Image (cartoon, rainbow, N blue to C red):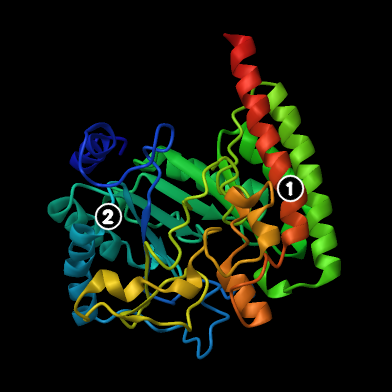
């Protein structure tokens, strides 16, 4: 395919022109500050034990958005965009497996193109259907995240090569939830990703909870990962740390939070209900049929922001506060019953965030040396 679509041209204009809408400061102009997270279906080719949808109460792997609700969604996204005052927005297709219904991906992106200034389009897939997908339906998708699940790295490579050859995708990310197998092979996945120019994104296995043995193994592997990435930076490879581990944004240095949780995240579920969190499919704050759509995703308990007055003083004085922001509110809600304490992986963050920042300092030094 590989063509510059009208939607791509539109998106480039969004990045480059001035407007009264809110946009990130220098260096963050392309960062989306509003996220439409679409779970249009829970149908999937797999049942991964660490999947957010699979672990929700009353999970139904056949639940799919009906036609009436989907039709409303096509109007609802532009309606929210008109009032959210955010310049760079992203639509992320999740599931379930979104490639089961690429026709709906196309319809959403067409509606976005026709009724807004343009949005980033991102598909998160396990890649099981990559050989049979209709690429014409995905022509306006520019980012694709491929979950390695339990497949081999060789098979992951084959799937990602197909994406690069047949799509308009300009950036591919390898996703890996760190269950026992992926935690063990995290360095092999990293080596493959870095040497082939892919971005990396690793998630803790949320459902391991606060198991000290798992956290110990996780921290050990994170240090080994940082050691490896430092070596790659020194050798001139482009290493990205934004969203490398869970939802951390280590380079963010200001206390105003970049995290849209509970403020600028519109998570839409297959039944048309909406919520403020990608991980929590039980907490619903409204539906896409409600009036005043933006107000329905405002949920203080999910604010991921160090400026919250109810957070511990220890967090507000921490050197990693602008990256950690006292940790994911939903993690805390899940394991402690409220969202006001410090991160459930505080000890991990205190050790790893400085190392991620060190990687970017090394990158800057490497650029200065080469120039």
Is 22 displayed left or right of 248 in the figure? Answer: left
Instruction: Note whether 356 is above or below 243 in the view shown.
Output: above
Query: Who's the residue at 49% across and 52% down the image?
Result: 145
Would you say the residues marked 2 and 1 are in contact, meaning their CB atoms lie under 8 Å apart? no
Is residue 201 at all visible to an observer of this figure? Answer: no
C-alpha separation, residue under disc 2 versus residue under disc 1: 40 Å
| Crowding near the residue tagged with mark 1, few <14, some 14–19, many ≥20 C-alpha atoms within 10 Å | some
Say what secondary structure mark 1 lies in.
helix
The number of numbered discs placed on residues in the rendered structure image is 2
Which comes before the other along the chain, label 2 or label 1? 2
Point out the residue furthest to the bottom here.
Answer: 58
Instruction: Note whether 365 is above or below 122 in the view shown.
Output: above
| Crowding near the residue tagged with mark 2, few <14, some 14–19, many ≥20 C-alpha atoms within 10 Å | some
Point out the residue furthest to the top here.
Answer: 371
Say what secondary structure mark 2 lies in.
helix
Residue in the foreground of this view, choosing between 354 and 208: 354
Query: Who's the residue at 49% across and 74% down the image?
Result: 301
Nearer mark to the viewer, of 2 and 1 = 1
Query: Quadrant of residue 62 in the image?
Result: bottom left
Query: Who's the residue at 55% across and 79% down the image?
Result: 54
Residue 220's spot in the image, x, y percent?
84, 52
Is 321 displayed left or right of 293 in the figure? Answer: right
- Label number found at residue 352: 1
Instruction: Note whether 11 is above or below 366 in the view shown.
Output: below
Is 46 displayed left or right of 65 in the figure? Answer: right
Is residue 20 at all visible to an observer of this figure? Answer: yes
Residue 190's spot in the image, x, y percent?
68, 42
Residue in the foreground of this view, choosing between 299 and 249: 299
- Label number found at residue 137: 2
Query: Who's the residue at 59% across and 33% down the image?
Result: 196
Query: Quadrant of residue 211 in the image?
Result: bottom right
């Amino acid at each position: 395919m590989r063509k510059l679509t009208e939607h791509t041209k539109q998106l480039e204009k969004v990045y480059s022109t001035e407007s009264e809408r809110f946009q990130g400061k220098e260096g963050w102009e392309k960062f989306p500050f509003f996220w439409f997270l679409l779970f249009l279906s829970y149908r999937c080719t797999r049942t991964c034990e660490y999947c957010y949808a699979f672990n929700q109460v009353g999970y139904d792997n056949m639940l799919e958005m009906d036609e009436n609700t989907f039709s409303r969604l096509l109007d609802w996204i532009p309606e929210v965009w008109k009032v959210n005052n955010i310049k760079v927005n992203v639509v992320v297709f999740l599931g379930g497996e979104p490639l089961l219904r690429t026709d709906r991906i196309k319809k959403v992106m067409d509606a976005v193109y026709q009724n807004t200034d343009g949005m980033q389009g991102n598909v998160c897939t396990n890649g099981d259907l990559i050989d049979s997908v209709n690429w014409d339906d995905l022509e306006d998708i520019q980012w694709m995240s491929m979950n390695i699940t339990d497949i081999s790295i060789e098979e992951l490579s084959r799937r990602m090569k197909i994406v690069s050859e047949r799509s308009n995708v300009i950036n591919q990310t390898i996703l890996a939830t760190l269950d026992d197998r992926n935690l063990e092979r995290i360095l092999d996945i990293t080596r493959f990703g870095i040497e082939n120019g892919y971005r990396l994104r690793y998630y803790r296995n949320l459902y391991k909870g606060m198991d000290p043995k798992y956290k110990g193994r996780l921290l050990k592997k994170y240090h080994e990962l940082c050691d490896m990435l430092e070596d790659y930076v020194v050798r001139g490879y482009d290493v990205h740390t934004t969203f490398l581990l869970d939802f951390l944004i280590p380079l963010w240095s200001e206390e105003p939070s970049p995290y849209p949780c509970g403020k600028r995240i519109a998570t839409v579920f297959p039944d048309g209900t909406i919520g403020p969190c990608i991980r929590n499919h039980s907490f619903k704050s409204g539906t896409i049929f409600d009036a005043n759509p933006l107000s329905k995703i405002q949920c203080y308990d999910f604010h991921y922001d160090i400026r919250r007055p109810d957070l511990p003083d220890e967090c507000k004085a921490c050197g990693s506060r602008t990256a950690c922001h006292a940790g994911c509110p939903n993690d805390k809600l899940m394991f402690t019953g409220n969202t006001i304490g410090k991160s459930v992986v505080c000890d991990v963050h205190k050790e790893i965030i400085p190392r991620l920042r060190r990687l970017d300092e090394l990158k800057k030094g490497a650029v200065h040396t080469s120039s």
